[in-house]
Structure formats: structure tokens, C-alpha cells
Amino acid sequence: MAICRFMHVVSCLALTAGSGAALAQEQTPSSTQGLEEIVVTAQRVAQNLQDVPIAISAFSASQLRDARIESVRDLAQYTPGLTSSEVNPGEPNFAIRGIGTEGINSNAGGDASVVMFVDGVYIGRGGGSNLNLYDLERVEVLRGPQGTLFGKNVVGGAISLVSRKPDFKENFVGGTVSYGNYDRLELLGRFNYGLSDIAAVSGAFTRIRRDGYTRNATTGNRVDDEDLWGGRLSVRLAPSDVVDIVLSGDYTKQDTLGQPRDNVCNASFNGGVHCVGVDPDPRVVNAVDDGFLKREVGGLSATVTLDSPMGEITSITAWRKADYSHRDAFFSNPVNPPTQIESINENVEESQQFSQELRLAFKTFNNRLSGVMGLYFLTENIERNEMLEQTFPAPAQQGRNAFPQDVDSDSFALFGQANLAVTDRLTLTVGARMTWESKRAHLQGILVEGPGLPPPLSVPFDVRARESWRAFTPRFAADYKVSDNVMIYASAARGFKSGGFQGTAGTGSSAATPYDPEFAWNYEAGFKSRFFDNRVQLNVAAFRTDYTDLQVSQLVPLCCVVIGNAATAKIEGVEAEFVAQLFEGFRIDASYSRLDAKFDSFADGATADFTGNRLPRAPKHQIGLAGQYEVPVTDSINLFGRVGWSYRSKIFFEASNTPLEVQKSYGMLDGRLAVRSADDRWEVAVWGMNLTDKLVKNHIVAFAPFQQQLNTYQPPRTYGATVSFQF
């Protein structure tokens, strides 16, 4: 078995690394310029990243700044196994190790495969997870199923954002001003004020405005622009030495034009009516409507920590709300009526959720037995209306349909994990989670006006349905400390994603029929190491994941997006992350992942059989490479420079794996140059992203019936300057 062979190699490498570390420590015992320690909470307790037997990528606040990582999408450049795309603007779809679900965008009854958490709070829907990364302490990306401690839907992995907590002893006010091409202006302000020894308050505010990357030749406007503002306020109280309370609120508002799709006309499509007069420039569209994107996201949370004789008790209570509306022209072409063929897609969604988590972290038997146990409750309400307007030449003319959806879901879970230190070097871990879920759906299909050609909805429907599921998700792991700086580990873990209902079904019977939950067993082995006097870090993981009842979304032409259980899939791969600080101020970061993700079988539940095909958005190779150097110019001023390069091999956007739905392999080059104070009080920087101006598809729809390939793209080359200060 591949994992077994890998473990043999791991053991040899770990022993070698352990010897090298010991030798290096003997040679340079006085050096203090090693890599910084990063504390993570991947196991719901604070631990050193190198002590956690899970494949994790972690980014500190300074790393986010230096790499100019401003959104979760940016993380994908330097995180092995992570990809990001968008079917609709403002509703991102993340995939880890090839597992993600795009169909949930139009489906109120569906769930994501990769879930975002903000300060431990589950963020379910796509429109609510599109958050900018500001005022953070760190970001953690957990790869593979995390069903035991993180719960439902974390079948592909988790992205955890950890905000900066108010500090009782630090007072400061800081700000950042950035200006770049496309008239991009970004303002960020933040502060912290210690009111007393037991009370502190902190906050942050951001404002971003940018012209669009794309020009709509029909209206003359720049579309795909950005206009966003948001803020966060936190209050921290410590009424006694054993109680810590953090109350937080956040709000984000976005109001921009839409993102009409580029109409690609090549040898495969040049016979279509949509290709008449199409501008070949991919940054120019000919949409009849600019469209729009409006989004309001906010929430409140209370985190209470109590040190008790039993251990540390943590309560996280949270409420969140997200309002999202979006309108875009699906076909973008300059042909005018009566030969006009156009489709307008408009979505409106309102979602609310309330969650409560209560857990106990304990240590006993002289700290040889430790762990965490708890309970979790989540209730959600999602109301979404998918509206589709189609205009065709006579005699079909116009058809307009609407798919109102109202879905309520409840989830309750009991969970626990125990770690037994058998010896000073060997630790065994056993954990499990039992989850009960239920969903109640009111689904409608309404023919608003006109016949369409042909109508996606032939017979209106109004159905109600409900379903419930149970899932048991255990985890088993063993880790062994070869030396103080080298650990090897092996684990087996199960994850699941909830079942759901078809939100945009073609018939009432299809809407009322639920699809099944998705399950995965992940087998992983790896090692984590630091050597050469803490200057070099190498973490490697090999894995195999077996999926059953994998949920796959497919576009049915002239109808809708259908979600089906595509039987089974097998994913195997290797991931490596390397960091080296060979001398003071100079650092190299490198990452690599190799992924083999294919459907073992693909039948029933879906519209076609794609057995043996690669999973969508699963690149075989991903590489991230960055080098940075900071050197003193004077006693108080430093010069900083960073260059980053990332590579991703080709991916398919659909399970069909057709050549028309491929993003070819590409590399992306970024850079940043800064002058900053030695105490980090101020900085002046210039930067550039996608410096070679690569045209990278964000999503593709190959619409064969009308000889159409419709694309959206990632940002072009951007550059600008940033001034930051803190006093």
C-alpha cells in the first residue's frame, strides 16, 4: 500500500532529520534567529503547529501582510491542495484535495464541502464566507476531513480565521492607505485600547473601491468592479483570573456591478449566432445588462472561557446573517433582436444561523491524558429565489422562471477526543462525533411569463419535503517524537457532508427527492520537522481518501444545476511544505502537492457516467515558491523585498472533463518592496500581483446547444503603493 511505503520513507527521513537537528544544535547553540513558533487551534486547544498530527498550513499576520494575502482566494496560491473559484461573483467555492461543491450556489438545500470558521463560528453559505482578511492574528487551513472536532460538512477541510483579540496592556491606533491601478483605493484603520486591567476594546474598519477589470461594450460601463466597506468591534472582559469573555460584532456591505461572462469564439464555436460581432478581447463583453452584486454580511458572537478544576470550559454563542443578491447576463453578445439570444440570471438569498458550542478541554494523570469533549447545536434558515429569464428569436420569444426556496435545518452533535501519552514520545489519539441533522424544505417552480425555448420549467410545482440523517465520524491517530524537533504520525478519520434537496429542479418530484449525505475515510501519514538550529522546517503528508455517495453538481442545458450522488471516488496525494531562514532576514517558503483524484464510479443520481474522470478543480500539481529578505539600512530603518511564484497544472471545471472546460497550467508571479521602521511602526511599500498578466479562468461553462463557451476570469495584473502606520 502506498501509505505503508511512504511511512517507511518517513521513518528514514525523520531519523535523518533528527540526527541533523541534534548535530546542528551542537554546532550553533547560541543562535537565536530561528523560525517563529505558530500556535494553532486545529484540535480545539492551543498547540504548536509542529506538534499537531494534522496537515495544516498556517499564516501569521505578518506573513499575510508580506505576501499581500487579502482574501481567502489569495491563500490558494501558497497553500498546497487548496483551490478557489466562483460560479457567481461574491459566492466563492473552495476545494481542498479536489473536494468542493459548486452546486450549492443555486441550492438553498445544499452545503459546502470546505467550511470557513471565524473565531470558531461555522460560516455555512457562500455569500457569507466571502470575507476579506483584515485585522487577523492568523489563518489556518486544515486539509482533509475534520469531522470529529469541526463537525458537519468539513469533509474536504476547513479554513479557520482567527481575529486579533483585545489586549489589556497595549494601546495603539493604526492605519493603511493603498492606491493602485484600476483606480483602486483601500483604507484600513484599527485600534486597541486597554480600559483597565480587566477590560479592553479593539476594532477595525476597511473601505475598498475599485474600477472594473472588464468593459461592457453595450453599456460602456466598467463591470466586475469593487465597492465594499466593513468593520469589526470586540470587547474583552476578565472579571476574575479564571474568566475571559470576548464579545464581537462584524459587518460588511458590498454594492457593485455584475460580472458578465466572456463569450469565447474559436474554431469550436465560430458557427454560433453568439459569435457574430463578438470582441476577441477577453476583458470586453457585450452584455445587454451590466448586472449587479449586493451583499450584506454580519454577526455577533460571545466567547466565554472559564478555568475550572475540571479543565478549561469554553462557550461560543453566535448569530449570523447574510443577504445576497446578484444579477448577470449569462450570454454576452452584440446580436440585437429579433435574433437576440440572451439569458439573465438573478438570485436573491437571505440566510440566518444561530450556533452554540460548549466544550471542556482537560488534562489528567500528570498530563498524560488530555483531550476535549463537548456538544454543538446549529440552526439555519435559508430563503433563496433563483430567477432565470431567457430571450429567444420568434416564435419562442421570452420565458421567465423562478425557483423560490425556503429551507430550515437543525444540527446537533456530541463530540470528544482523548490523547494518551503512552511514553514521553508516543501519543495515541481517539476521537468521535455523533451528529443528528434534519432539513425541512418548501420548494417551488414558477413559470412567471412566456414559453421560453424550451422552458427550463414545463410544469410549475409547489412541494414540501423533509429528511433527517445521522452520522458517526471517528478519528484515530498516533504520533511519535523521534527527537525534540521531529515528529512522525499516522491517522485515519471519517468526515461527512449533509444531504439536501434540489433547489432548481425541473420537476416537483425531483425537488422533493433528497440526495444522500457524502462520506469520506481519510488515511494519512506524515512527518513534521525542524532542524539546523530551528532554521529549517519541513512538513510532509501522504494521504488516501475514499469517498462514497460523493455529491457532484452538473449543469443540465436549458434547465438547471442538478446535484447527484456520484457513487465513489478515490483521491491519493502527497503534500510538502518547506521553510528556511538560512541567515538573519532571509527566508524561503516552498510548497508542493501532487494529487490523483478520480471517480471510481459515477452512475445513478446524476445525468451521465463519468467513471475514471478526474474530479473538478483537482490539479495534479501545485507549487508555491517565495523568497524574502529584510536588511537594516540604518539603526531604525529596514529594507524589505519579496518575490513569490505559484504554479497550478491544468484543471477541469466539470466532471465531464471535456476539452472545452479546461484551465491550462499556468504560473503566477507577485512581488513586494518596502521600506519600514525597525520597530514596525510605519511602512511604505510598492507591490504587484500577477505581474506577467496571465489570463486565468475563474470558471467555465461550455454550453454546447448554442455553441457557447462562457468564462469569468481572475484579476489581471495589478500594482500599487501602500502606506501603513501605527502609534
Image (cartoon, rainbow, N blue to C red):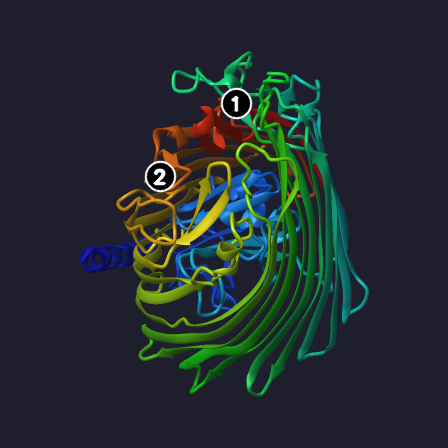
Q: Depth check: 296 or 211 in front?
A: 296
Residue type for callout 1:
Asn
Q: Residue furthest right?
A: 195
Q: Residue furthest top?
A: 277
Which image quarter is the N terminus in?
Answer: bottom left
Please tell me whether mark 1 sits on a helix, a strand or a loop: strand
- When the figure is inspected, residue 432 is found, relative to residue 654, above or below; the finding is below
> Dot 1, crowdedness within 10 Å: few (<14), some or many (≥20)?
many
Residue 445 in the image: x percent, y percent?
60, 50
Q: Is residue 179 left or right of residue 716?
A: right
Residue on which disc 1 sits: 263
Please tell me whether mark 2 sits on a helix, a strand or a loop: loop
- When the figure is inspected, residue 381 is found, relative to residue 127, above or below; the finding is below
Residue 718 in the image: x percent, y percent?
59, 26
Residue on which disc 2 sits: 656
Residue at 73 percent of width and 64 percent of height: 168
Residue 553 in the image: x percent, y percent?
44, 47
Residue 558 in the image: x percent, y percent?
50, 36
| Residue 440 visible to the viewer | yes
